Image: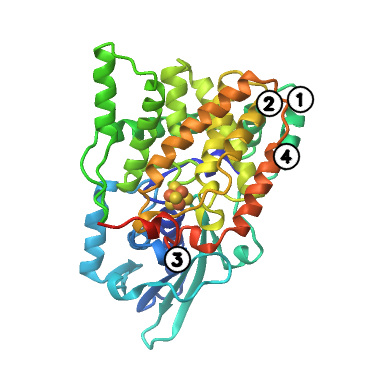
Amino acid sequence: MISVFELFKIGIGPSSSHTVGPMVAAARFLADLRALPAPPARMAVSLHGSLAFTGRGHASDTAICLGLLGERPDTVDPDAVPGLVAGLARDGAIRVGNRDVAFDPDADLVLDTAEMLPGHTNGMRFRAFDEAGALALERVYYSIGGGFVVGEQAADTGASAPMEVAAPLPFDSADALVALCRARGVDIAAVQRENETALRPLDEVEAGLDRIAAAMLACIERGLSTGGTLPGRLKVRRRARDLHARLQAGERANIRSPSEVMDRVSTFAIAVNEENAAGGRVVTAPTNGAAGIVPAVLRYLREICGETSPETTRTFLLTAAAIGGLIKRKASISGAEVGCQGEVGSAASMAAAGLAAALGATPEQVENAAEIAMEHHLGMTCDPVGGLVQIPCIERNAFGAIKAIAAASLALHGDGVHHVSLDCVIETMRQTGLDMQSKYKETSQGGLAVNVAEC
Ligand code: SF4
């Protein structure tokens, strides 16, 4: 099973596959270095495939440095990152046991666009050498999306690194999930909750869900109150604060626009994705690039629909996680594997399911909501301009959130009976991802990335 806490992870921006994953991999390598009988003399890292093409814009190089310094995505202070990286560049070494291991990020961290590693497009090779220059340790990791990292062997077998725990209520398709709900007379959130308790006690599950929701909502608030320009050569101006101020002024003056609800939801999503692009604290949902959709729809549920109880929020998150877990297992949530349909499409599908469930949908209606949202993201490519998670990513989250709300609403107006099943759409997404040219999978080699002038 894939836990709700694997799909929703508190981390930092701008990318789960290109920032959080490399940081996790580097920290794993550091742990392996510490386990050696004697620390090596120096080390080197190479990034491959999509990580090499868009690694600078996605801060993969920074993430590797942070991981080698022993930092973790969920605990690192985003404001301390520049100082930590500058310190490593100055020292030219990381500390392993009682020894400094030479590592100059400028020379020893290579973005290798020529070699693709065999297991996955997001490959990383870590090497350590002894005093004589002989190889002391080598590890290959793959960042497979959503912050998940696997070692060489798991990628060879196509494993996707979910927790190896037997779920008490297993399901391997949306149809099976709905049938399970029907047979037991429960909703999808109840099935996911029961499965979560195989990993941790119920009170920990609920406390963890409350923490995730709080982190999502806090991220929106930070985004709404922060202006300025995003990092990177595009010099993208942050918009969420001004949009929010404008909406509030209209509200105070009792000037209501017909598009006000849509504008508010867009602003919430943009706030999160601007925080993400700035390297701030975000929750992968299920990735960083798509991190704005689930929080924006959650705030819509609480603020516009008035559903603020902790239990409703937990229902929202658990249902979204059940759908996200299915998509991850049967297809992918990685832009580098299947394009943006796997990131923004999956997030919209999860948010639609969560919203429908929180508003009282039957399992059949929830499945329909998830299906509608995913169906209308099929084929969406990943083509971030300048390799930065900014254009089209930020606005794309706004549209994903609005589609998710529309999908939930359509499903709630129906009776759950529909032509295209969620299972069919997930499989279509997988096949479409296989057919998609690799230049549209987080390489910035095609689409908007080559047609938008960088000035
Ligand atoms: S275009 Fe989509 S998949 Fe690609 S980086 Fe942006 S949000 Fe992620």
Task: Give coordinates of residue 169: x percent, y percent.
Answer: 72, 35
Label 3 residue SS: helix
Query: Of the residues tagged 4 and 2, which is closer to the observer?
Result: 2
Task: Using the rendered view, name the quadrant where residue 303 is placed.
Answer: top left
Query: Of the residues tagged 4 and 3, which is closer to the observer?
Result: 4
Residue at image location 47% in from the left, 46% down from the top: 287
**Do tag 4 and tag 2 residues touch (Cβ < 8 Å)?**
no
The reply, left or right, for residue 83 in relation to residue 29 is: left
Per the model, the C-alpha gap separating discs 4 and 1 is 14 Å
Query: Of the residues tagged 1 and 3, which is closer to the observer?
Result: 1
Question: Mark 3 vs ligand 1: CB under 8 Å?
Answer: no
Residue at image location 40% in from the left, 28% down from the top: 265
Task: Please give the residue where the numbered disc 2 appears in the rendered image.
Answer: 363
Task: Give coordinates of residue 143: x percent, y percent.
Answer: 50, 59
Identify the image quadrant of the N terminus.
top right
Q: Which mark is residue 170?
A: 4
Task: Please give the residue where the numbered disc 3 appears in the rendered image.
Answer: 29
Q: Residue furthest bottom?
A: 132
Question: Mark 1 vs ligand 1: CB under 8 Å?
Answer: no
Per the model, the C-alpha gap separating discs 1 and 3 is 46 Å
Task: Please give the residue where the numbered disc 1 appears in the rendered image.
Answer: 182
Mark 2 and mark 1 lie on one chain; the one further toward the N terminus is 1
Mark 1 and mark 3 lie on one chain; the one further toward the N terminus is 3
**Can residue 256 be seen here?**
yes
Mark 4 and mark 3 lie on one chain; the one further toward the N terminus is 3
Per the model, the C-alpha gap separating discs 4 and 2 is 16 Å
Frontmost residue, 265 versus 362: 265
Packing grade of label 2 (10 A; few <14, some 14-19, many >=20) is many
**Do tag 2 and tag 1 residues touch (Cβ < 8 Å)?**
yes
Residue at image location 31% in from the left, 67% down from the top: 95
